[in-house]
Amino acid sequence: MESKMNIFRKSFHTFFRNYQYFTFSVALILLPASVFVLLTQAVEFFSSYPLLITIQIRLDSLFNAAGFPPSSHFFFLLNLKLSQTITCSIFSLPFTLSFLLIAKSAVIQALHRKTPYSSVFSLYNPLLLTHLCNSFVIFSAHAVGLCFLFVLFNSFSAFGYSSTDSAFFLSAGGAVVYSLILANTLIICNLALVVAGMENCGGFVAILKACVLIRSRVSTALSLALPINLGLAFLEALFQYRVVTIYHLSDKISFSMAFEGLLIAYLYSLLILQETVITCIFYTNCKSELRIDGEENYYYYRIKNMEEKNKSADPEFLHELP
């Protein structure tokens, strides 16, 4: 595996080599999705705000039934974050399934086919199917994380470790494990979208191929994803500070505020595109190493052969894997 700096250097070189195409055509396609994702962070803008309260109440009831400490600040933040994530995902879903996937298809088409201005809709269906399967996998990862926290807290409570200090250390340890589960799931899902576009396969087959490719390379994938995610988080915070906060103070939308919000959304789009380019370069490096690692090569191409023999999309063939 090439070093992380080499992958970053290649990705930036690729991005600037197709600078006009990425920053004008593809970024403008992605801009509506970026604007709506940033706006959904400020749920007060929508009449759906009661939905957030309803989800928080339901999750709070679930946490109480599971025996989580009701006074724990960690579970309060977890409840709030999960509620915001679910609400944002619901209302940004039409933009995600349209503008975001089309933009990712355009990036993959440009890097794989070497013909940036050809049709990108040939890759849309595999990416759409993979994105829907990714949503199920991410939901399952959250469920696994909550089950781990349930077993952790109830096991220690059964042995009498229910003090405030114990709850604090258990919350810290549980947060680390929960974050690792979610981070690994997200990088696999991002790689699965690239696999779906590069190899014209979709659904759980692309996710399974991504799992094989990322074996023994998880730390590299996390290192590559960290700077982009920090940049996205910074732009989300900047949008909240420069647009949402000012809107609450003045109670009106000015031209300068709208222009600044669009500029932040445009930068947000560029970071998402750069993340896709980095994932494509990472995929290329992983595929080149398949020739070196015989075991991974065996599993990967066995999946590919089984996929070709099961065009009927029968999911039972996955159970044939060792």
Image (spheres, grey):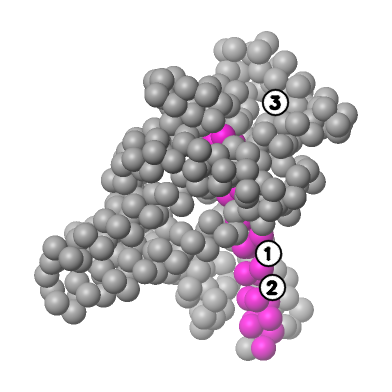
Look at the numbered disc 3 and give the secondary structure of its residue. Answer: helix
Location of residue 167 with respect to 229 vertically, above or below: below
In reply to whether residue 153 is colored magenta, the answer given is no
Q: Position of residue 120 (x, y in %)?
A: 41, 24
Q: Residue at x 42, y 49 (%)?
A: 270
User: Mark 2, residues whose alpha carbon is within 10 Å: few (<14), some, or many (≥20)?
Assistant: some
Mark 3 or mark 2: whose residue is earlier in sequence: 2
Residue 180 visible, this angle: yes
| Circle number at residue 161 | none
Q: Which residue is mark 1?
A: 177
**In what quadrant of the picture does the C terminus appear?**
top right
Horizontal relation, residue 302 to residue 30: left or right: right
Q: Position of residue 300 (x, y in %)?
A: 75, 27
**In what quadrant of the picture does the N terminus appear?**
top right
Q: Which residue is mark 2?
A: 173
Q: Which residue is mark 3?
A: 318
Q: Could you tell me if the residues under marks 3 and 2 are in contact, i.e. CB atoms within 8 Å?
A: no
Measure the alpha-carbon separation of dots 1 and 3: 28 Å
Residue in the foreground of this view, choosing between 227 and 174: 227
Magenta-colored segment: predominant secondary structure? helix
Horizontal relation, residue 238 to residue 194: left or right: left
Residue in the foreground of this view, choosing between 36 and 160: 36
Q: Could you tell me if the residues under marks 1 and 2 are in contact, i.e. CB atoms within 8 Å?
A: yes
Q: Residue at x 66, y 18 (%)?
A: 307
User: Mark 3, residues whose alpha carbon is within 10 Å: few (<14), some, or many (≥20)?
Assistant: some
Q: Which residues are magenta?
A: 165-194
Q: Quadrant of residue 32?
A: top left
Mark 1 or mark 3: whose residue is earlier in sequence: 1
In reply to whether residue 182 is colored magenta, the answer given is yes
Measure the alpha-carbon separation of dots 3 and 2: 34 Å
Q: Residue at x 49, y 29 (%)?
A: 110
